[in-house]
Image: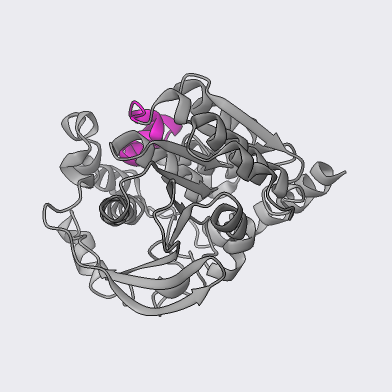
């Protein structure tokens, strides 16, 4: 029943998303304009770049300093709001002009729940599309469970174009990323990758214990990308992750008149996937050890269905996997996957077995 309800609620959300993304009509006026757009995208999908993504995704050699906007005692430790200047600079000069018009993007926000004594491990989590408010995701990811019961230091990263980083030009959180704008989507993933790698290095310098990352939906996709390019990660837990954002967009737009018009101009599924290959985890070999990979999905997910999750699971060598009852939006039994994360980390030796039985949520 939980999965049935989740699937049907996801269907409503899917229809809303199609209207949001496609109501602007055909994004290209002619086949020649489409070809010019693809020519400008070569900087992101050049074979040499895809073979060595650090050409675009590497963090700066000199890391920016983190500052605390506030620190508050919380049960078990300290809760902080940290910020740092984004190291990102636009790759394409055309996007650089657009990027300068946006406010709130040049400061990265990181919320932390840390223990007074060194924790056995740290985890960095990030959110899905269109949301980002910390209070929502504390509950979604079970941050009190991760922090107090499992004893982890927990960090929460806010993506560009979301919540505190929503530009004043956007009507709602996430409107501008990701989107059918192929260039802006590539650039925003470059920004996220660089910022997340700064955060991961700072966390590792503070506590050399095992370090992992988790995210849901768009955050799960981002987690899988970082697991493919970042050496410092010991474990990665993508939740409800599409293996290919391009394939997901294409499938969600199937049968829409706008997509049909773009196809007539020369757009194909393969060309779309190539345009976004830089940030697809399917492009890169995972760097996180096989034992440290854990993919979580929902039985009734009507947005990121098994056909979108399975390619990542296959690409990652069929690692540990768990599916809970519920949907993409109505995650009815998400507490089940929280407990599975505890078992996963105990099996890795990251947390002590006895912590799994301390208290009940």
Q: Residue at x 43, y 65 (%)?
A: 112
Q: Quadrant of the N terminus?
A: top right
Q: Residue at x 30, y 40 (%)?
A: 232
Q: Where 11 falls versus 89 (above or below)?
A: above
Can residue 303 be seen in the rendering of this structure?
no
Q: Where 96 falls versus 284 (above or below)?
A: below
Q: Position of residue 105 (x, y in %)?
A: 32, 70
Q: Position of residue 303 (x, y in %)?
A: 64, 45
Per the rendered image, the range of residues in magenta is 266-287
Q: Residue at x 59, y 70 (%)?
A: 135
Q: Quadrant of residue 231?
A: top left
- Using residue 14 as the reference point, say whether residue 269 is left or right of it: left
Q: Nearer the viewer, residue 247 or 198?
A: 198
Q: Position of residue 47 (x, y in %)?
A: 20, 29
- Using residue 3 as the reference point, say whether residue 183 is left or right of it: left
Can residue 218 be seen in the rendering of this structure?
yes
As for residue 37 lying within the magenta part, the answer is no
Q: Nearer the viewer, residue 91 or 291?
A: 291
As for residue 269 lying within the magenta part, the answer is yes
- Using residue 306 as the reference point, say whether residue 52 is left or right of it: left
């Amino acid at each position: 029943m939980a999965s049935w309800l989740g699937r049907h609620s996801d269907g409503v959300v899917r229809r809303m998303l199609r209207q949001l993304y496609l109501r602007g009509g055909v994004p290209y006026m002619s086949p020649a304009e489409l070809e010019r757009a693809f020519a400008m995208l070569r900087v992101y999908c050049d074979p040499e770049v895809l073979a060595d993504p650090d050409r675009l995704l590497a963090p700066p050699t000199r890391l920016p300093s983190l500052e605390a906007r506030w620190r508050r005692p919380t049960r078990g430790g300290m809760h902080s709001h940290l910020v740092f200047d984004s190291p990102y600079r636009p790759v394409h000069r055309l996007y650089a002009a657009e990027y300068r018009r946006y406010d709130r993007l040049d400061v990265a926000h990181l919320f932390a729940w840390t223990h007074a004594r060194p924790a056995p491990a740290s985890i960095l989590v990030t959110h899905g599309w269109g949301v980002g408010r910390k209070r929502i995701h504390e509950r979604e990811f079970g941050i009190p469970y991760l922090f107090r019961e499992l004893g982890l230091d927990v960090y929460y990263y806010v993506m560009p174009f979301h919540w505190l980083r929503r530009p004043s030009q956007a009507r709602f959180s996430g409107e501008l990323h990701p989107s059918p704008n192929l260039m802006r989507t590539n650039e925003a993933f470059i920004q996220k990758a660089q910022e997340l790698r700064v955060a991961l290095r700072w966390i590792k310098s503070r506590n050399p214990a095992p370090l992992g990352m988790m995210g849901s939906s768009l955050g799960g996709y981002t987690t899988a990308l970082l697991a493919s390019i970042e050496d410092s990660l010991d474990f990665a837990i993508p939740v409800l992750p599409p293996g290919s954002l391009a394939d997901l967009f294409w499938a969600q737009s199937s049968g829409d008149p706008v997509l049909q018009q773009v196809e007539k101009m020369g757009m194909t599924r393969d060309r779309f996937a190539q345009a976004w290959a830089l940030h697809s985890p399917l492009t890169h070999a995972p760097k996180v050890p096989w034992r440290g990979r854990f993919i979580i999905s929902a039985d009734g997910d009507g947005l990121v269905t098994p056909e979108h999750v399975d390619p990542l699971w296959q690409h990652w060598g069929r690692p540990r996997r768990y599916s809970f009852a519920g949907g993409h939006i109505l995650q009815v039994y998400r507490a089940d996957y929280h407990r599975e994360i505890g078992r996963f980390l105990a099996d890795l030796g990251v947390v002590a077995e006895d912590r799994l039985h301390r208290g009940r949520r």
